[in-house]
Amino acid sequence: MKSKRVIIAISLFITISTFAQNKNEKEMEKRIVNPWKWQNERSYVQAIEVTKVKGTLYVSGQTAIDADGRSSTDDMKTQLIKSIQNLEKVIKEAGYKCKNIVRLNIYTTSSEELFTCFDVFQNWITEHNIKQASTLLEVKSLFETLKIELEATVVR
């Protein structure tokens, strides 16, 4: 009888300790750093501090490549939409959420062409309530016929 009480007491102690430990674990926190206001219209933030992270996903540049590995020959807007869809697919497949993108770099072969459809990108950012640090780079070329590539870091 005494050994049963000891086992029950130990089990209860372990359960309470585990509960207390889990209760003390905090959710991930993001702190936006924007010394100015002008970047708000451009759909990014100057810096983002992330604490209490449980995982970090580094996503390779996603482009307008179909499921069979064929590069798109479509216009910038169509390629941007497909690149966003591919980025979402990778993020979801890994068990993360787009709203937790903290860094999103954009590579394009034509900034001028990208800005004609930049509203597609901005609407997607707004839809997912993404607050990310970003860099936009115009490059001489991307793989094959591609015009845009999105590279992300996501946390949870």
Image (tube, rainbow, N blue to C red):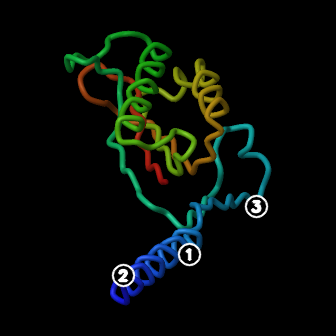
Disc 1 or disc 3, which is closer to the eye? 1
Instruction: Please state the horizontal and vertical placement of residue 72, each as a whole percent of the image.
Output: 31, 14
Secondary structure under tag 3 reads: loop
Quadrant holding the N terminus: bottom left
Residue 154 position within the rendered picture, expressed as x and y whole percent measured from the top left: 46, 49
Residue type at tag 1: Ala
Residue 35: numbered disc = 3
Q: Amino acid at mark 2?
A: Lys
Residue in the picture at 76% in, 61% down: 35
Q: Contact (CB < 8 A) between labels 1 and 3?
A: no
Residue assigned mark 2: 4
Q: Residue furthest bottom?
A: 2
- Cα distance between the residues tagged 2 and 3: 62 Å
Q: How many marks?
A: 3
Number of other residues with Cα within 10 Å of mark 3, as a class: few under 14, some 14 to 19, many 20 or more:
few
Is 69 rendered above or below residue 2? above
Q: Say which label, 1 or 3, has the lower sequence index.
A: 1
Q: Residue furthest right?
A: 37
- Identified at 65% across, 38% down, the residue is 129
Q: Amino acid at mark 3?
A: Pro
At mark 1, the secondary structure is helix
Pick the residue in front: 121 or 21. 21
Q: Is residue 58 left or right of residue 9?
A: left
